[in-house]
Image (cartoon, grey):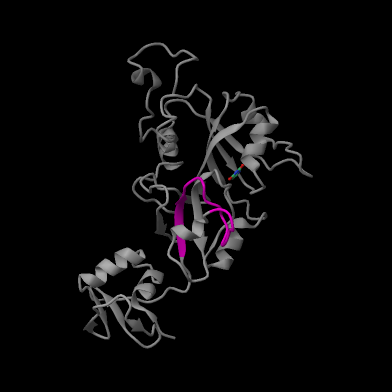
Amino acid sequence: MQTRLDKFLTEAGVGTRSEVKSIIKKKSVTVNGICAEKPEMKVNPDTDEVAVGGKVVTLRSNVTYLLHKPAGYVCAVKDNCFPTVMELVPQGRDLFPVGRLDKDTEGLILITNDGAMAHRMLSPRSHVDKTYLAVLDRPAEDGWITLFSEGVEIGDDAPTLPAKLVICDAANPELEYLPEEYKGGLFPGQAVLLTIQEGRYHQVKRMFHAVGREVIYLKRLSFGSIVLPLSLKKGEAILCDPEKTIDMPGNRVNSLTARAAHGDVKRKSAQNRRGGGSCQKTERI
Ligand code: URA
């Protein structure tokens, strides 16, 4: 079946539609050895040989994008009221989002056409870890670390599975993911990291609601071994291989914390940041 050259190259993961158009303009694309001049040129992926910079391009059967979802987008293939995450990745190829984030939640969402991978990541039996950075209306309490590790009653048939709560201080590198408006303006304990193994409806918000807090900002930082690159801007997507651990430059979550625990990376000293003064509970992080 014939398709437009720019559509074919976009679906093959060469770049976005506009990037692909500019590559064609620069005369870097050949079709059957002849320089392609026009993005609208028709090619047959089964019989034509398309190359970029001399390298033959083939359509991968499975494709997965890692999207940094901005707030305001819904995780659905179609929606009558709101923009969908599908508008932020190349079109076509029967793509769908792997699970959901709420409209007001930001962060890592996978968009794929690989049904088997999506099933593995989402199956309740897989217990795939998902780590969220949340800002609470008031500071968290230390006792919740144990409470959450034992599962929380949130009004469903069963309590949640054990979850890992980290109450952040100024030294947590994950705070770099916070929007500028929160940086330096939060009370200690107002920013938390929560790792859950399930994906129940509004789960993170309901877990904090159960202990008397409201989540005022929520961002997913990781999904299984896949981490949101710190350098990926809101609304940007990159191709990714969910079978591999992603360890890209800018990847800070878990790896930085783990490396800090091993002494490879210095945790920022809260005292240093404040010029050596004493740490007051009311000082902002
Ligand atoms: N938990 C929530 O409450 N919202 C999300 O978007 C994801 C997890």
Q: Indicate whether residue 65 is drawn in magenta.
A: yes
- Work out whether residue 77 or residue 159 is closer to the camera in this orientation and state it: 77
Q: Please report the bounds of the magenta region as a residue range.
A: 64-82
- Left or right: residue 135 versus residue 239 is right
Q: Residue at x 39, y 51 (%)?
A: 247
Examine the image and state in which quarter residue 117 appears.
bottom right
Q: x, y percentage for residue 32?
A: 27, 86
Say if the magenta span includes residue 163: no
Q: Image check: 134 left or right of 273?
A: right
Provide the major secondary structure of the magenta segment.
Answer: loop
Q: Toward the viewer: 191 or 198?
A: 191
**x and y percent of residue 93 in the render?**
48, 71
- Left or right: residue 98 versus residue 270 is right
Image position, residue 262 (x, y; %): 41, 35
Vertical position of residue 206 compared to residue 198: above or below: above
Residue at figure coordinates x 70%, y 36% from the top left: 152
Q: Position of residue 214 (x, y in %)?
A: 62, 31
Q: Is residue 9 visible?
A: yes
Q: Is residue 31 above or below residue 67?
A: below
Answer yes or no: is residue 242 visible. Answer: no
Q: What residue appears at the point 25 percent right and 79 percent down from the top-left corner?
A: 36
Q: Residue at x 58, y 47 (%)?
A: 102
